[in-house]
Amino acid sequence: MAIHEMNLQPRYYDYIKNGTKRIELRLFDEKRQKIKLGDEIIFSKSESDKFVAKVIGLLRYDTFEHLFNDFDINVLADDSMSKDELLNVLEEFYTPQKQKQYGVIGIRVELKS
């Protein structure tokens, strides 16, 4: 088992911590290709605010838009957001060109108690 670290914006950190967001969305780049089932991820929004989650699923897609077709917004973020809003936020970080280059991954997580 490996341990990975990921920084999150406060909004998405809170969504995972409170249990609404159960799939973390990332580009399937070299760093994320190392993530395996059973690994742990330390999510942080600051040096002192962190929690640990276990990887329970890995969902590979060519784009976030295709991944969004298979899941409700209430597991991808929170139902206060629309899929279009979330897609726009993701594309600020991961351009459509980067998505085509690497593909994307939905990392299913479960909080460690």
Image: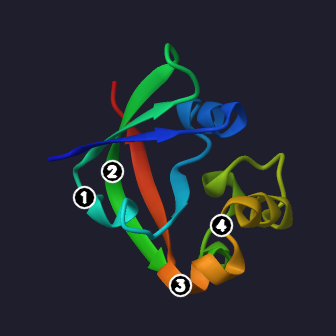
User: Dot 2: what SS?
Assistant: strand
Tell me the distance, in whole angstroms, between the alpha carbons under discs 1 and 2: 5 Å
Mark positioned earlier in the residue sequence (1 or 3): 1
Element under label 4? loop
Mark 4 to mark 3: distance in Å?
10 Å
The residue sitting at 85% across, 60% down in the picture is 85
Upstream in sequence: badge 1 or badge 2: 1
In this image, 28 relative to 10: left or right?
left
C-alpha gap between disc 1 and disc 4 = 23 Å
Residue corresponding to mark 4: 94
Residue type at mark 1: give it. Leu
Q: Nearest to the eye among marks 2 and 4: give it.
A: 4
Q: Position of residue 65 (x, y in %)?
A: 69, 78
Q: Which residue is mark 3?
A: 101
Residue 43 or residue 113, whichever sits in front:
43
The secondary structure type at the circle numbered 3 is: helix
Q: Nearer the viewer, residue 80 or 46?
A: 46
> What is the spatial separation of the Cα atoms under label 2 and label 3, in whole angstroms?
24 Å
Q: Position of residue 77 (x, y in %)?
A: 68, 50
Dot 4 or dot 3, earlier in sequence: 4
Tell me which amino acid carries mark 3.
Answer: Gln
As drawn, the label of residue 37 is 1
Of mark 2 and mark 4, the one earlier in the sequence is 2
Is residue 62 visible in the rendered image? The answer is: no
Q: Residue 20, how many percent across, how many down?
A: 62, 42
* Marks 2 and 4 close (CB-CB < 8 Å): no
Q: Where is the C terminus found, in terms of image quarters?
A: top left
Q: Which residue is mark 2?
A: 55
Is the residue under label 2 in contact with that under label 1 (CB below 8 Å)?
yes
How many other residues sit within 10 Å of disc 1, few (<14), some (14-19) or many (≥20)? Answer: some
